[in-house]
Image: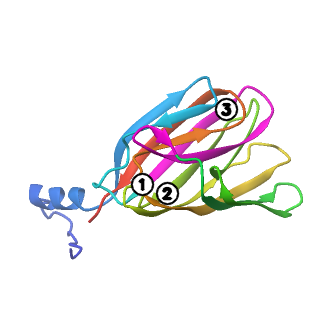
Amino acid sequence: MAIKTFATGEVLTASDTNTYLANSGLVYITSASATSGATLNIDSIFSATYRSYRIVMEDVRIVSGVTGVSMQLRASGTTNNTTYYNVRQGFDYTTGAAGAAPTANGASWNLPLIVDGGNSAGCAVDIFNPFLTQKTGYAGQGIDSRTNGYGALSGSGFHNTAASYTGISINHGNTYTNINVVVYGYRIG
């Protein structure tokens, strides 16, 4: 679709508005939250309507300690816990030293999100082709909420199983006191 430009004083028609709304941007799918537990499952979010998705995790807090957050893919309410490949990397806030945490053939993706008890953290990840019967990929950026931790975290990886998935499981080794997750689909223009 060619991009139409408008001049000052020109009328923007309903047809023009509908065309632009139908062919661009993120589309809200659902949100979920938890204030306890170590796992948050969100099902029925991936479908043939979209090929790529954005998952935003905000105000993630835990009871105490330090923990990384991981994600697994789900199909029909069942979590897949094999063949995840990824790397999470960042730079130390105080020294600037780089650090990385790779996973090869693991049980989950290590998201670019590390939470320190009492502090809030968050991340945004894009999921590519989860509903198609092929390898699913992800890439994202997030926060390490430790004052002596790795800031500016990033991560990417793929799931080495060609399968169709409909949901996710967000996990860590502690107990949430809060987590908010919003899922969007990338509109196909």
Magenta stretch holds residue 73: yes
x, y percent for residue 66: 79, 38
Q: Amino acid at mark 3?
A: Arg
Q: Residue at x 27, y 54 (%)?
A: 49
- Residue plotted at (21% across, 76% down): 2
Q: Quadrant of the C terminus?
A: bottom left
Disc count in the image? 3
**Residue 44, image x and y in percent?**
36, 40
Residue beneath the point at 67% across and 32% down: 61
Q: Is residue 36 above or below residue 122?
A: above
Is disc 2 surrounded by few (<14), some (14 to 19) or many (20+) residues within 10 Å? many
Q: What kind of element bears circle 1?
A: strand
Taking the image as shown, residue 47 lies to the left or right of residue 10, namely right
Q: Amino acid at mark 2?
A: Asp
1 or 3: mark nearer the eye:
1
What's the residue type where badge 1 is placed?
Tyr
Q: Are marks 2 and 1 in contact (CB under 8 Å)?
A: yes
Q: Which numbered disc, 2 or 1, marks the residue that appears first in the sequence?
A: 1
Give the residue at mark 3. Answer: 61
Mark 3 → mark 2, Cα distance in angstroms: 21 Å
Q: Closer to the camera, 87 or 188?
A: 87
Magenta-highlighted residues: 54-79
- Element at badge 3? strand
Q: Which mark is residue 53?
A: 1
Q: CA distance from mark 1 to mark 3?
A: 24 Å
Label placed on residue 126: 2
